[in-house]
Image: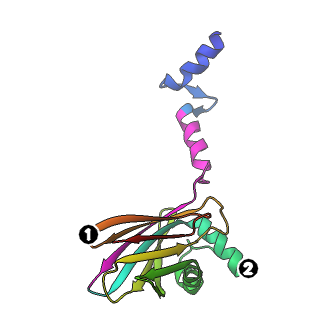
Amino acid sequence: MKYIFLFLLIPFLSQASFGDHDVEELRFRESATNTAHKYYLSVSNVKYNSKVGALQMTSRFFIDDLEDVLSARADKSVVLTEKGSLEIHKSLIGDYFKSRLRVKVDGELILIEYLGAEVENDQLVLYIEIQVNQEPSEIEMRFTALMELFEDQKNMVHLKIKGERKTLLMIAKKKIDSVKF
């Protein structure tokens, strides 16, 4: 019983140590080496820019997941965090997203334009434009990025159109979603 009591007290003792390592140091090492994330979610934001006549979309994906899917697609290792690699792989990334993102605006299929990306911590931030003639009344999306790799992948898209904010959610069982404004 006294051993259990001592074990429970260790985290509360400020000078507690385990061998040559402080308990807090061991906890940090444990969390630092566990880098795999347990959820598969991309989050995108879309707003209408009347000055350029386009829906502007910013999407965030975990870099390691995107590297895995692009490596499988290219049959070679793709590393996106090395200097210059985003420019080297720009067409590969653009082609992938053009094949995984379909957008209908007011019933008309609109092609997307991949503008580029940047690394932010452990995520890749993608910039996409969708040219439209006017502020849309209805948007339908099919967004299947990473779903071929992860069956639990969810692609969430927040839209801000006509002052309203609405959200689309695409999952493996429901790859298409739409909203009206």
Which amino acid lies under the numbered mark 2 shown in the image of this protein? Asp
Residue on which the image places disc 2:
75
Q: Quadrant of the C terminus?
A: bottom left
* Residue identified by numbered label 1: 163
At 42% from the left and 84% from the top, the residue drawn is: 130
Q: Which of the marked residues, 1 or 2, is nearer the chain's N terminus?
A: 2
Q: Residues within 10 Å of mark 2 (few under 14, many from 20)?
A: few
Q: Which span of residues is magenta-colored?
A: 24-50
Which element carries disc 2, helix, strand or loop?
loop
Residue 104 appears in the picture as rendered: yes
In the rendered image, the vertical position of residue 15 relative to residue 153, given as above or below: above
Q: Is residue 22 above or below residue 131?
A: above
Is 71 contained in the magenta span? no
Residue 87, given in percent of the width and then of the height, sits at: 52, 84
Residue sitting farthest toward the bottom: 133
> Residue 92: which quarter of the image?
bottom right
Q: Quadrant of the N terminus?
A: top right
Between 176 and 62, the one lying in front of the other is 176
In terms of secondary structure, where does tag 1 sit?
loop
Residue 52 percent across, percent down from the top left: 30, 87
Q: Is residue 50 left or right of residue 171?
A: left
Q: Does 25 lie within the magenta span?
A: yes
